[in-house]
Image (cartoon, rainbow, N blue to C red):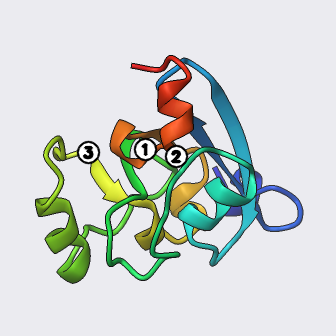
Amino acid sequence: MPHDEWMEPDGVFTTLALLPNGESHSLQAPAGWRLMEVLRDHGLPIRAECGGACACATCHVHVAGPGRLPLSAPEGDELDRLAEIFDADDSSRLACQILTGPQTDGLAVRLAMDSLWDDFVAGGVS
């Protein structure tokens, strides 16, 4: 399929965000945004305490389904932060280290429990 048929008309890419309570949200963003910013700007309950500096791991997500192009592998500081997370696995990424673009078009991510606002978790999600 030609490149232009996958992309939204205005160069906007769509990512699916899955919450532990079963909600799913289709998020659109132009290329070059940090996925963490997209999640936060759409009002999803991601803590993202360091604001994208890769210093805290509070934007932990699990890749639940691929985008149309592969994501680059985590490296450096992201690997260090992921090593600090108890339930990190091979699907774990930090949303602050994923830039939107063709690689996030169609991507599905599940927000990890350790990255959710405390009041969202206290509201009955387990």
Q: Element at badge 3?
A: loop
Q: Position of residue 29 (x, y in %)?
A: 74, 62
Q: Amino acid at mark 1?
A: Pro
Q: Nearer the viewer, mark 3 or mark 1?
A: 3
Q: Position of residue 44 (x, y in %)?
A: 65, 45
Check if mark 3's residue and mark 2's residue have beta carbons within 8 Å.
no
Residue of label 2:
107
Q: Can you say whether 118 is above or below 34 in the image?
A: above
> How many numbered tags mark residues here?
3
Task: Decide: few, some or many residues near mark 1? Use Cα within 10 Å; few <14, some 14-19, many ≥20.
Answer: some
Closer to the N terminus: mark 3 or mark 2? 3
Q: Amino acid at mark 2?
A: Leu
Q: Position of residue 118 (x, y in %)?
A: 48, 41
Residue of label 1:
66
Q: CA distance from mark 2 to mark 1?
A: 5 Å
x 55%, y 36%: residue:
119
Closer to the N terminus: mark 3 or mark 1? 1
Closer to the N terminus: mark 2 or mark 1? 1
Q: Amino acid at mark 3?
A: Ser
Q: Element at badge 2?
A: loop
Q: Which mark is residue 91?
A: 3
